[in-house]
């Protein structure tokens, strides 16, 4: 307590940390079945209403000498004085949860000695300044249920030994600088529900073994360098509700099989070079609330069936090469409002605009010309240079005469 908080001299004023009525803040005690005595089993510092940490606080390695300690939480605690995680191996340690988050001054590598904490089930080291490689040793902690090392500066590859964590339900390695491919052994994590590897520098393809993750609900691979093809058995992920894979150089058609993931609520595949049409099978995703396909090379018409997605709340198809008439009625357009973006598709148009006052979806109203769209002339009241209107309206005339495509 003295090394963490300077609120008062607790050793003098309250010599018994577990005594009812005078217990120390940030410490919780419970009776052990071994000796029927009270022992400290939880430490919680840094987040109100728990004690804040003093500016000179450093990681207290003495905690591993507490044989009955089960849970440690240090959030926003080490923010002034640089410190490292130091593990003093103790065969009597019964620690089950170690959570160190948002500590700006917690630096250095993850110590491999964490592997000595054999009872550990939850290891959260998120939003610190940790660096170095992911130690292979901690992948021997087969009791782990949740492993979160996100928002650090970890480098190197994801070791194949990650497949040893058979009891893992959540794995989050996002926002690091990990490289190399996603190991095929990831498919051995049969209980996994959340896998977040986004915002790294991972390369290669999504491994075929990922289809074995029958309980996977959340899959995030965004902002990497993944490319190539999707696993053939992608449709086997029938528990999947969130699939986030923006910002990867995929450069391939959208997989029809995605339409078989009927529990999907969010599907994000923006900025990835996808080409070809939007599969009609996407109309089967009746639980979908978010569909983001912007900034790709998608062509063809918008599938009519997308208008039947009654749960859709956010739809972004902007900056593609889509064409034809927008298949959404006024009720659909009004329901989404600003959450619908179809802009940047010059061959896309809206068949009438009655009843859509104030609704802007980024496309023009269809005309009678062969191209299937016109651009409405701007008025001087719109903010633009005076000469701009002459050029703009001249292009409109060319468009009506069917000469626009010939020129551009």
Image (spheres, rainbow, N blue to C red):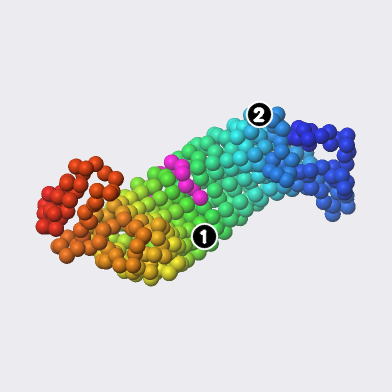
The x, y position of residue 263, in whole percent, is 47, 66
Question: In the image, which is nearer the foreground, mark 2 or mark 1?
Answer: 2
Query: Residue 391, position in %: x, y?
Result: 17, 46
Q: CA–CA distance between discs 2 and 1? A: 39 Å
Please tell me which residue lies in front, 307 or 357: 357
Q: Which mark is residue 217?
A: 1
* Residue 104 found in image quarter: top right
Q: Secondary structure at mark 1?
A: loop
Asked if residue 257 is positioned above or below residue 2 in the image, the reply reads: below
Q: Quadrant of the N terminus?
A: top right
Which residue in the structure is indicated by mark 2?
Answer: 81
Q: First in sequence: mark 2 or mark 1? A: 2
Q: State the mark number for residue 193.
A: none
Residue 200 belongs to magenta span? yes
Label 2, secondary structure: give it. loop
Magenta stretch: dominant secondary structure: loop
Residue at 31%, 61% in the rendered image: 278
Q: Are the residues flagged by discs 2 and 1 in contact, CB closer than 8 Å?
A: no
In-front residue for pair 262/327: 327
Chain part drawn in magenta = 196-205
Circle 2 packing at 10 Å, graded few (<14), some (14-19), many (20+), is some
Up the image or down, 267 lies above or below 5; here it is below
């Amino acid at each position: 307590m003295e090394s963490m908080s300077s609120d008062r001299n607790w050793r003098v004023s309250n010599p018994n940390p577990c005594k009812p009525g005078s217990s120390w803040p940030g410490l919780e005690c419970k009776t052990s079945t071994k000796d029927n005595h009270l022992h400290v089993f939880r430490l919680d510092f840094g987040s109100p209403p728990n004690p804040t940490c003093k500016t000179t606080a450093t990681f207290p390695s003495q905690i591993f000498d507490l044989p009955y300690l089960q849970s440690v939480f240090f959030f926003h605690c080490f923010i002034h004085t640089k410190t490292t995680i130091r593990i003093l191996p103790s065969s009597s340690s019964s620690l089950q949860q170690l959570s160190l988050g948002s500590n700006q001054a917690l630096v250095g590598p993850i110590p491999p000695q964490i592997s000595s904490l054999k009872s550990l089930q939850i290891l959260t080291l998120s939003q610190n300044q940790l660096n170095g490689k992911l130690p292979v040793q901690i992948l021997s902690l087969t009791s782990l249920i949740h492993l979160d090392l996100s928002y650090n500066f970890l480098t190197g590859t994801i070791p194949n030994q990650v497949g040893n964590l058979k009891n893992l339900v959540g794995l989050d390695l996002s926002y690091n600088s990990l490289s190399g491919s996603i190991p095929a052994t990831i498919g051995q994590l049969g209980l996994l529900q959340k896998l977040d590897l986004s915002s790294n520098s991972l390369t290669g393809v999504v491994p075929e073994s990922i289809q074995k993750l029958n309980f996977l609900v959340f899959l995030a691979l965004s902002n990497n360098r993944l490319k190539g093809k999707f696993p053939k058995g992608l449709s086997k992920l029938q528990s999947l509700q969130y699939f986030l894979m923006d910002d990867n150089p995929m450069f391939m058609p959208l997989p029809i099989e995605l339409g078989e993931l009927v529990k999907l609520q969010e599907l994000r595949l923006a900025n990835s070079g996808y080409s070809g049409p939007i599969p009609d099978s996407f109309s089967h995703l009746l639980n979908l609330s978010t569909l983001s396909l912007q900034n790709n090379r998608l062509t063809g018409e918008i599938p009519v069936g997308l208008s039947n997605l009654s749960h859709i709340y956010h739809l972004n198809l902007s900056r593609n090469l889509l064409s034809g008439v927008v298949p959404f009625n006024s009720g659909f357009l009004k329901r989404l409002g600003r959450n619908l973006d179809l802009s940047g598709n010059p061959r896309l148009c809206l068949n009438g605009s009655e009843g859509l006052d104030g609704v802007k979806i980024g496309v023009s109203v269809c005309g009678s010309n062969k191209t299937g769209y016109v651009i409405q002339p701007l008025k001087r009241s719109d903010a633009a240079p005076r000469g701009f209107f002459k050029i703009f309206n001249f292009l409109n005339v060319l468009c009506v005469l069917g000469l626009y495509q010939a020129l551009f």
